[in-house]
C-alpha cells in the first residue's frame, strides 16, 4: 500500500529516466501513464520493486505504472510537482535503490490493473519455515512471473495488428472519460435511491442535473479526445462533435427524417471528429501559412459539420439503436446462454486486447439507457479469477512465495482488478486460467438467467468491477439488482474455486517435495524402484 505519494513519485522518477525523459504525464483509474523520449532508459525491474507498484504496462504510445485505484491520482500529482521542480525532492522523500522507503521499511503491495498487458509486480519470495522445502523452481512465484512475462511478450507481438492498434486508440479516447462517468454514475445512483425512498425531494432534481449534465455533453469530450488521438486540433474536434448534441439540429432533415439532438451519440461524435481531423490535415498540407490560419478551421468545421449532419448522425444513430436493441434482446431472450459465453470468454478477450472494442459500446448503452447491461455480466470473469487464485492458494500450500503473491493480489482482485492474478498466477500455471474462465461463465450465466426472468442488472458507469461495482448498479430496485449481482459474484467465486481445486492443478500439486521431518525425497519421488511394502 502506498503511504506517501511524494516518496513513491520520487522513487519512480529516476527509474523512468529522469525529468528529461518524460514527455507527458496523465493517469486513468489505476495507472500513471507516461510519454517517454527514450524507452531504453527505463529500469523495469527496479520499477516493479518500488513499494506500492503493482506492475507495468507497455502500450506503444505510453508507458504505464500500475498503482491501483484511489492512490494513482495522488502519486500523479506528486510526480507532476517533481517534474515542475526538475525532479528535486527531500532526502526523506526519495526511495533507496533497494526499493525501500527512506526509513528502510518495505512498503506493502496490493494488486490492481485494468488492462490486459500488465506485467505483474510479484511479491518477494518468503523464506520457508524450518523443515519445509519450497516446491521446485518451475512452480515458484518468481518462475511463474517470468513465464507470465514471456506469455505477455508473445501475446504483445501477436497483438501488433492494424485492427488492434485502432482498438487501442479508441480505448485511449474513452479511458480519460472514465473518472467523470464513475462520478456521475454514483451521483445518479444516489439520486435514484433517494427518489425510490421518497427522501429529500428538494435535492433529487439537483442531483439528477449534476449526473446528467456530463452525459448530455459527452459528445464534445469524445470529439476533443478523438482529434487529439488522431493528430488533429482537439478544440476543432470538439467543435465538430458538438453539433451532435446541439438542440438546433431538430430543424435539420436528413434522409427525409428530422434529426434529434444527440442522435448517433458518442459513435457519431467519434466519426465526426475523425472526419474533421482528416479534413484539417488535408487543408494544412495544401494551404499557405497566410490562409491556413483562417481557412483551415473554417473548412474543417464547415465540411465535417455538414457531412456529420446529413450523413454521420443518421448512420451512427441507426448503429447505436441497433446496439441497444441487440444488447436487450441478447439478455432477455438468451440470457443464461449469453451470460455463460460472455462471462467465459472475457478473460481471453482481455488477453487478445479485443475487450477495448467494448468501451464505446458500454458508453453508447449508458448514454441511451442510463446503464450498460453488459458490464455486470463481464465482471463475472473477475470473480472466476478470484476463485481460481484462492484454490491455487489452498492447493499449493507449501509454495510460500506464490502464496505471498496471491495474498498481495487477492484484495484488489475482489475489487475487480485481476491482471496481477492472471499474469502472475493463473496464466503461467495454464489450467487455472481455463478453470477461471469456467467460474466466469457460471457467474455470467447466473446474472443472465435473472435477466431472462425480468430482473435486469446494469451499471451506470464503466471502470469499476467486482465489489466496487455495487454503488453503480441500476436496473430494477437496487436491493434486488444488488442481490442478483452479488449472487453472480458468489457463483463465480465458488465455481472458479471448485473447478481449479479439482481440475485446475496436476495430481499431487500442493504436496511437499520432501518429507519435512527427514529432509529427503519421499520414497515415491526417488528415482529407481520403490522399496517393497512391509508385510
Image (spheres, rainbow, N blue to C red):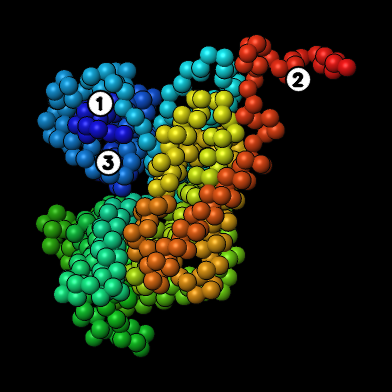
Q: Is residue 64 visible?
A: no
Q: State which mark lies toward you, 2 or 1.
A: 2
Where 348 sits versus 268, above or below?
Answer: above
Q: Is residue 192 left or right of residue 514?
A: left
Residue 7 picture quarter:
top left
Q: Label 3: few (<14), some or many (≥20) within 10 Å? A: many
Decide which of tag 2 and tag 1 comes sooner along the chain. 1
Placement of the N terminus among the 4 image quadrants:
top left
Q: Is residue 317 above or below residue 287?
A: below
Q: Residues within 10 Å of mark 1 (few under 14, many from 20)?
A: many
Label located before the other in sequence (3 or 2): 3
- Badge 3 element: helix
In this orientation, which residue lies closer to the viewer: 394 or 334? 394
Q: How many numbered marks are there?
A: 3
Residue 99 on image: x %, y %: 31, 22
Residue sitting at x 46%, y 31%: 405
Residue denoted by label 2: 524
Measuring from the top left, give residue 317's x and y in whole percent: 37, 75
**Residue at coordinates 52% horizontally, 39% vertically from top-left?**
389
Look at the image and tell me whether residue 410 can be seen. Answer: yes
Q: Residue at x 37, y 28 (%)?
A: 48
Secondary structure at badge 2 equals: helix
Q: Which mark is residue 72?
A: 3
Alpha carbon distance from label 3 to label 1: 14 Å
Q: Nearer the viewer, residue 338 or 507?
A: 507
Task: Look at the picture and state if 18 lies above or below 498.
Answer: above
Measure the C-alpha gap from mark 2 to mark 1: 49 Å
Give the label on residue 452, or none. Answer: none
Q: In the image as oriented, which residue stretches furthest toward the right?
A: 535
Point out the residue furthest to the bottom here: 256
Image height of 421 relative to 263, above or below: above
Q: Which residue is mark 1?
A: 11
Amino acid at each position: 500500500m502506498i503511504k506517501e505519494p511524494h516518496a513513491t513519485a520520487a522513487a519512480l522518477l529516476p527509474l523512468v529516466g529522469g525529468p528529461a525523459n518524460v514527455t507527458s504525464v496523465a493517469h486513468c483509474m489505476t495507472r500513471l501513464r507516461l510519454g517517454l523520449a527514450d524507452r531504453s532508459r527505463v529500469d523495469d525491474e527496479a520499477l516493479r520493486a518500488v513499494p506500492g507498484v503493482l506492475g507495468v504496462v507497455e502500450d506503444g504510445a505510453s508507458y504505464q505504472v500500475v498503482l491501483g485505484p484511489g492512490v494513482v491520482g495522488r502519486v500523479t500529482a506528486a510526480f507532476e510537482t517533481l517534474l515542475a521542480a526538475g525532479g528535486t525532492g527531500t532526502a526523506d522523500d526519495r526511495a533507496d535503490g533497494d526499493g525501500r522507503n527512506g526509513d528502510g521499511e518495505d512498503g506493502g503491495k496490493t494488486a490492481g490493473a485494468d488492462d490486459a498487458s500488465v506485467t505483474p509486480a510479484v511479491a518477494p519470495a518468503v523464506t520457508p519455515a524450518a523443515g519445509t522445502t519450497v516446491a521446485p523452481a518451475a512452480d515458484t512465484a518468481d518462475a511463474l512471473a517470468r513465464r507470465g512475462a514471456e506469455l505477455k511478450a508473445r501475446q504483445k507481438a501477436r497483438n501488433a495488428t492494424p485492427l488492434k492498434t485502432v482498438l487501442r486508440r479508441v480505448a485511449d479516447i474513452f479511458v480519460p472519460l472514465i473518472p467523470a462517468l464513475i462520478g456521475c454514475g454514483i451521483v445518479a445512483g444516489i439520486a435514484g435511491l433517494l427518489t425510490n425512498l421518497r427522501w429529500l425531494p428538494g435535492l433529487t432534481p439537483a442531483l439528477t442535473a449534476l449526473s446528467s449534465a456530463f452525459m448530455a455533453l459527452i459528445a464534445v469530450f469524445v470529439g476533443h479526445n478523438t482529434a487529439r488521438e488522431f493528430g488533429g486540433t482537439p478544440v476543432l474536434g470538439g467543435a465538430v462533435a458538438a453539433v451532435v448534441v446541439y438542440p438546433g439540429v431538430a430543424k435539420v432533415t436528413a434522409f427525409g427524417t428530422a434529426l434529434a439532438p444527440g442522435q448517433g451519440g458518442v459513435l457519431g461524435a467519434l466519426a465526426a471528429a475523425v472526419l474533421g481531423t482528416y479534413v484539417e490535415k488535408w487543408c494544412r498540407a495544401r494551404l499557405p501559412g497566410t490562409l491556413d490560419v483562417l481557412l483551415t478551421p473554417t473548412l474543417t468545421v464547415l465540411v465535417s459539420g455538414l457531412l456529420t449532419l446529413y450523413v454521420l448522425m443518421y448512420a451512427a444513430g441507426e448503429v447505436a439503436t441497433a446496439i441497444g436493441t441487440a444488447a436487450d434482446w441478447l439478455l432477455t431472450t438468451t440470457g443464461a446462454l449469453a451470460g455463460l459465453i460472455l462471462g467465459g470468454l472475457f478473460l481471453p478477450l482481455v488477453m487478445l486486447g479485443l475487450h477495448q472494442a467494448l468501451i464505446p459500446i458500454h458508453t453508447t448503452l449508458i448514454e441511451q439507457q442510463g446503464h450498460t447491461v453488459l458490464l455486470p455480466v463481464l465482471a463475472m470473469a473477475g470473480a472466476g479469477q478470484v476463485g481460481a487464485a484462492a484454490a491455487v492458494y489452498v492447493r499449493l500450500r507449501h509454495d510460500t512465495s506464490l502464496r505471498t503473491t496471491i495474498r498481495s493480489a487477492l484484495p484488489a482482485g475482489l475489487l475487480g482488478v485481476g491482471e496481477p492474478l492472471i499474469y502472475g498466477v493463473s496464466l503461467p500455471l495454464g489450467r487455472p486460467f481455463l478453470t477461471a474462465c469456467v467460474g466466469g461463465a457460471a457467474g455470467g450465466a447466473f446474472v443472465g438467467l435473472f435477466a431472462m426472468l425480468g430482473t435486469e442488472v446494469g451499471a451506470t458507469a464503466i471502470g469499476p468491477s467486482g465489489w466496487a461495482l455495487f454503488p453503480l448498479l441500476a436496473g430494477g430496485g437496487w436491493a434486488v439488482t444488488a442481490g442478483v449481482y452479488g449472487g453472480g459474484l458468489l457463483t463465480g467465486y465458488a465455481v472458479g474455486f471448485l473447478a481449479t481445486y479439482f481440475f485446475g492443478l496436476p495430481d499431487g500439486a500442493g504436496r511437499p517435495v520432501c518429507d519435512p521431518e527427514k529432509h529427503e525425497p519421499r520414497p515415491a519421488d526417488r528415482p529407481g524402484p520403490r522399496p517393497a511394502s512391509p508385510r
